[in-house]
Image (cartoon, rainbow, N blue to C red):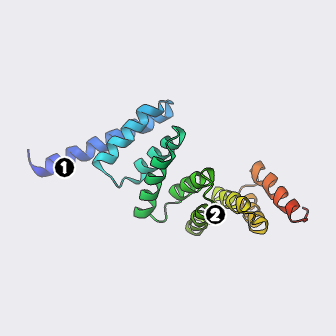
C-alpha cells in the first residue's frame, strides 16, 4: 500500500475515534469516551479537541494532575484556545492554585473578552485571593455578558458587601 493511501487511512481512523468518543460522551459512557480520545491522542498528539475532552473526563475521574498536563499541552499548542484556558482555570481553582488561576483567567479574558464564564471564573480566582474589588469587576463583567447567570449576581453581591459597597 502506498504511503499516501496509508496516511489517508490513518487520518480516517483517528477521526473515527474522535467521533466515537463524542458519541460515547453524549451517551454518558465517560470511561469508553476517554479511551477513544486517548486513541486519538496516540495518533494525533496535538488534537485540540481530544486534549480538551480527555482533560475534562480526567477531571471528572478525579485524575487532576493528568488533566492539568493535557490542558497545559493544549494551551502550549493553541494559546488562544479559550475552552482550554477556562478548563485549566477551573482546575487550578479546585486545586487552590489561585495565583496561577488568575493568570489563566486573565489570558482567557484577553483571548475572548465576551465569554461570561471566563470573567466569572476569573472573579472566583480573585475572590479566593481576597481581591474583592477585582472579583466584583469580573462578576459585573460576567453579568453584563450573561444576565441570566444567577451565580455571578450572587457572587457580585457578596464581593460588594465584602467591600462595604451595595448594589
Q: Nearer the viewer, residue 53 or 60?
A: 60
Which residue, as the protein is rendered here, is positioned at the far left? 1
Q: Position of residue 33 (x, y in %)?
A: 42, 35
Looking at the image, is 24 positioned above or below residue 95? above
Q: Report the side of 111 relative to 146 (left or right).
A: left
Looking at the image, is 61 positioned above or below residue 101? above
Which residue appears at 91% of the width and 65% of the height? Answer: 164
Q: Nearer the viewer, residue 49 or 73?
A: 73
Splitting the image into 4 quarters, where does residue 73 fall?
bottom left
Please report contact status of discs 1 and 2: CB closer than 8 Å, yes or no.
Answer: no
Q: Position of residue 95 (x, y in %)?
A: 59, 51
How far apart, in angstroms, are the residues tagged by discs 1 and 2?
39 Å
Q: Secondary structure at mark 2?
A: loop
Q: Report the side of 47 relative to 90 (left or right).
A: left
Q: How many tags in the picture? A: 2
Q: Residues within 10 Å of mark 2 (few under 14, many from 20)?
A: some
Which residue appears at 70% of the width and 57% of the height? Answer: 124
Looking at the image, is 139 positioned above or below residue 151? below
Q: Which residue is mark 2?
A: 114
Q: Which residue is mark 1?
A: 7
Which residue appears at 60% of the width and 58% of the height? Answer: 97
- Return the disc, 1 or 2, that comes first in the chain's sequence: 1
Q: Quadrant of the C terminus?
A: bottom right
Q: Residues within 10 Å of mark 1 (few under 14, many from 20)?
A: few
Q: Report the side of 46 relative to 6 (left or right).
A: right
Q: Position of residue 128 (x, y in %)?
A: 71, 58
Q: Secondary structure at mark 1?
A: helix
Q: Quadrant of the N terminus?
A: top left
Q: Position of residue 105 (x, y in %)?
A: 61, 63
Q: Report the side of 43 relative to 57 (left or right).
A: left
Q: Which mark is residue 46?
A: none
Splitting the image into 4 quarters, where does residue 106 fall?
bottom right
Amino acid at each position: 500500500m502506498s504511503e499516501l493511501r496509508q496516511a489517508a487511512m490513518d487520518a480516517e481512523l483517528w477521526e473515527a475515534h474522535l467521533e466515537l468518543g463524542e458519541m460515547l460522551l453524549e451517551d454518558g459512557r465517560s470511561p469508553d469516551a476517554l479511551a477513544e480520545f486517548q486513541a486519538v491522542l496516540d495518533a494525533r498528539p496535538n488534537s485540540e479537541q481530544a486534549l480538551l475532552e480527555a482533560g475534562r473526563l480526567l477531571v471528572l475521574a478525579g485524575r487532576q494532575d493528568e488533566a492539568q498536563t493535557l490542558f497545559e499541552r493544549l494551551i502550549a499548542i493553541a494559546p488562544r484556545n479559550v475552552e482550554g484556558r477556562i478548563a485549566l482555570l477551573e482546575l487550578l481553582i479546585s486545586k487552590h492554585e489561585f495565583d496561577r488561576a488568575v493568570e489563566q483567567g486573565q489570558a482567557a479574558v484577553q483571548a475572548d473578552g465576551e465569554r461570561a464564564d471566563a470573567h466569572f471564573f476569573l472573579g472566583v480566582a480573585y475572590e479566593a485571593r481576597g481581591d474583592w474589588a477585582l472579583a466584583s469587576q469580573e462578576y459585573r463583567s460576567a453579568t453584563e455578558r450573561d444576565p441570566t447567570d444567577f451565580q455571578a449576581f450572587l457572587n457580585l453581591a457578596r464581593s460588594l458587601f465584602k467591600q462595604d459597597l451595595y448594589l
